[in-house]
Structure formats: structure tokens, C-alpha cells
Image: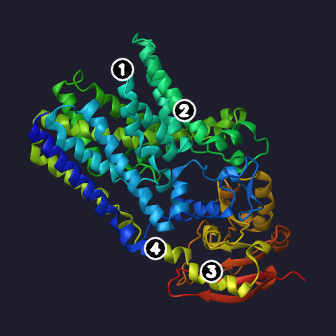
Amino acid sequence: MSLSYLKNEKKLIGFSLAIIFIYLSPLFILGEDAHIRVHDNLDSNIAWYKVLVESGQLFGGIDATIPQIIDGLPRNALAPEFSLIVWLYMLFPTMIAYGLSQAITRVFAFIGMYLLLRKHFLKSEEWGLIRIGVALVFSLTPFWPSGMLSTLGMPLALWAFLNIRNGEKSWINFLVLVLLPLYSSFVLGFFFFLTAMGIFWLIDVIRGKGWNWPFFLAIVLMTGAFMLVEYRLVASFLFSSEPNSRDEYFHARLPLWRVIRLTFKNFILGHTHVMTVHGLIILPITIMAFLTIWTRKLWKHERAFVFLLVLNFALSTWYAFWFYKGWLPLTQNFHFMDTFNFARYHFLRPMIIYVGFALGLKILFQQKVFSKKMVTTVLALQLLVVGIFNDEITHHRKPSVQEFYATDLFKEIKTYIGKPLETYRVASIGIHPAISQYNGFYTLDTYNNFYPLSYKYKFRKIIESELAKNKTIKTYFDEWGGRCYIFTDELGKHYMFKKNTNRSLKKLEINTRAFKELGGEYIFSAVPIENAIQNNLRLEKVFTTEESAWKIYLYQVNLS
């Protein structure tokens, strides 16, 4: 590589890192006044980290429980102690931990994609702009925050695996494969990546390229590292005999026409947990590159691009067909097909889409369809698109972190009740129970994918009459149940009613005796319950503050 090339590449890398930190700056500047994702974030994971750290059970045994959640949530339902994201939340306040986690993920996403493209897909000096530009926009995609490097770390892992496959013996490759499990999830990304690597190795063997034991052992090494980090998950899967809420997760319900629609929806729009925001810029570029290959008969020269495009669509198809009702006979006979979400092979798509994007730009430039200026313009437009998906822009209408958790408001409630938190249990209506959990309350309700099925049945008695009125919430609770909430017919599947709402509950029917039997004493409702007396509830006080997004109607169970 020429000196001028290296100098220019360093400048582009420095520019990219500066963009990443500008993108992240609202998290550090605004702190708890920042607006971030609520779904599968504020409503769950962030509160879970705080509860876990404060529970004294971070290193609890396999059979340990977290008494603050339900009737003792299994310790194994929360993050393992070897996951570094937990340590961030233990060492730093919530928003500093969150910002640092975002920074770690995005920087290593950039490094991984850049190294992968430079070493294995776009090796020539002339492609520096494309590989750095694509690495930058890839690193700014709105990934699921608590997924860490589960998907955005795949390019770095693939870079290491391809190096090993090609005979490199550098210790750095193996170090990458051992360290990535400390900041990613097996079931939310790398299970699917590693099985893909296993298939890749097997295809090499079938094609006569030899057994390539270093490549195979690298796959075993990373899998083993994940098994050690996530030993709680392994223990729960192999040794737990108690039925849990995952045993009633039923996915095979869609008719064929909806499956076909979901295929194209996923292919064009992506998925909330692995948002790629590729439909506006990247997809048209990909189609243009494919048509260029088609018209100019470039199949032999651009096999990598064509393979990735076909694989991309195949993964969307697999994702959609996982929910096809035709699976039902198999799921009834093989229960693990319900309890484990094999649809998540589509989590490979972010890496595939962005590598394909880089190859597509290369093809269009090589074939003189695009000039260098046009390539730069396309990269700038995609940068603008992912920039618009910054949390502070997309979630600015939602409560800020401070407004969401409303710590001052819940301090007032604690003071008013005036009893040790561990001596009573609460539940919420119209707001997420994670808010109460974050503020230290012991809750009967929760959002967790893994808790005893026996508890789900006990909790169901509280809302049995409400479920009977509404098929949507009945199906949602009975055939999934991850949100163990006090659902109501009048509010439906909504649980964020802010203090300016005009909604109320007029026909609530909950079993307060069943609530009391579970230890429940108070209900935090975001809306007034007009027939509270008929439900053996007594309004104690209404709480609100200027900083809080909520108005809390505090009801106490009044069984005479």
C-alpha cells in the first residue's frame, strides 16, 4: 500500500470515529434527559440489570432466585455474571453504562466490518472509501441495545474465522473468538452464526478442500467460550425439569398468504431487533448491481455478491415460514421447536446486507455505472438515513429516561406507603412493571421470557375475567406470556398511558383475592379505575410530578 493511500485511509477512519462519537453524544450530554428506545430496553433490560446488581445474587447459585420479581424469579433468567454489560451497570450510573455500551458496540462494529471488507472482500487500495463508508453506516444501524455485539460483532468474528480458514496462525484471530462471547449473546445472535460457520466448514469438506482442523477447532473454541459464559442458560436447558413460560410459546399460526407477505416485509424493512434501515438506499443499489450483473453476464466474476443476495432473501423467507401454521404437527411432536426461536437465523442479515452493499457499490463503479462522486453521494445518503434513526430523533416523542423511570415520583409513593419494600408486593396497570422494579418495588408482574409456568397460572387467575373478554390479550398471554401484566379489555395491549391521558377503566374485573394470595397489596394504575370499589380496591392517593411521564393512582386491596 502506498504512503498516500495509508494517510488518506487513516483520515477517513478518524473521520468515521468522530461521526460515531457525535452520533452518541446526546447520551452523554443529556444523560437521563436523553430519549432512548422503550421496547425491549427501558421496559425490561435496563431495569433487569439494576435489579440484578442490587439483588446480591449476581453470583448466585444455579437454583438462586431474585425475590424482587414475581414469587422469586430464577436467577438464570437474567444476564450471566460473565457478561461485561452487567459490569458496566454495576460500575456506572445507568446512562453512563448505557452510553459506554453503545460506544463499545458501535466502535467494534465499525472495526469488524472494516477489517472484513479490507481483508476478504475489497482488498484493493481503490476501495478504501467504500469499505470505510460501509463500515461507518453499518456501525450506526439502530441495533437492539442489550444485544451488544450479538449481531454487530459478526463481521469481526467472520474476519477471524476466514483468516483461520485461510491458514493464518495469528493469536489475534483466536483472541477475538474468545473475547466476543463476553459481550454478546449466544441465543440472540451467535448460535445462528456458529451453525452457519459449521455448515461452511462442512461444505468445504464436501467440496474436497480438506478437513481444515484449525477452522473446525476455532468453531468449537468459540462455542465452548459461549457455553462457559452462559453456563446458566446451559444448565437451565439441560437440567431444569420445572416447566417454564417458554413451554407455552406457540409460533406456528400464520396462513400461507401472510407468510409470503411477511417474507417481503422482512426483506424490505428488516426486523426491530436487527434494524438495518436498508430499504431506501441500499436495496435499490443492490437491485441495480444485480441488474448490471444480469445484463453484462458477470455471474462468474461476482459470485460472492449473487450468493449474498440469494442468502439474504432466503433468510427472510426462513424467518417468515417459521411462523407458518404448517409447522404445527412438528411442533406438537418436537417441543424444542416451540421453546427455541429458530427464526432468528435472519439475525445474520445485517452483516450480509452491508457486505452486499459494499460489493454492489464496487460493481457499479467498476462497470462505470457510478462515478466516484456518485459512490460518495450514495454513502452520504445512507449515512443521513441511519443518522435520522438516532434515538434522540426517533424517540423524542416518548418519555426521556428520567421521565420514564420517574424516580422522584416513586420515592413519594414509597414514603407514603411507609413500609419496607420487601414486606408487600405491587402490580401495575397501564405502565410497565419495569418502572416499579427499577425503583426497588417488589412486583407480582414482570416482563421476562423465562419464569415458572406454575406462576403464570397463578397470575392468570387475577386477570382471567379480563382475558375472557378480549381474544387479542388472551392469545398474547396464553400463547406467549412473556409480559406477565395485568391486561384489561378496555386498555388492550397498551401499557404506556402518560399523565395527560383521558382514558379510564369503567368495567374492570380482576380477582383481587387471587392478587392478595400472591402477596399483592397495592396497584399502581396509570388511569383511574372508576369501579374500584366493585374490585375491592380503595384509592389511597394520586401522585404526579413535573418530571414524571405518569400520573399514578395508588390503589390498596381492601378485602373485608
Residue at (22%, 36%) from the top-left corner? 289
Residue at (62%, 80%) from the top-left corner? 410
Mark 3 touches mark 1? (CB < 8 Å): no
Residue 295 appears left or right of 261: left
Give the quadrant of the N terminus.
top left
The answer for how far apart the CA atoms under marks 4 and 2 are is 37 Å
Rendered image: mark on residue 32:
4
Asked which secondary structure carries label 4, the reply is helix
Q: Quadrant of residue 56?
A: bottom right
Nearer to me, 489 or 255: 489
Q: Position of residue 178 (x, y in %)?
A: 48, 36
Q: Residues within 10 Å of mark 2 (few under 14, many from 20)?
A: some
Nearer to me, 172 or 117: 172
Give the residue pinned by disc 2.
223
Mark 2 touches mark 3? (CB < 8 Å): no
Say what amino acid the circle numbered 4 marks.
Glu
Give the residue pinned by disc 3.
410
Residue at (80%, 70%) from the top-left corner? 515
Q: Earlier in the sequence, mark 2 or mark 3?
A: 2
The answer for how far apart the CA atoms under marks 2 and 3 are is 43 Å
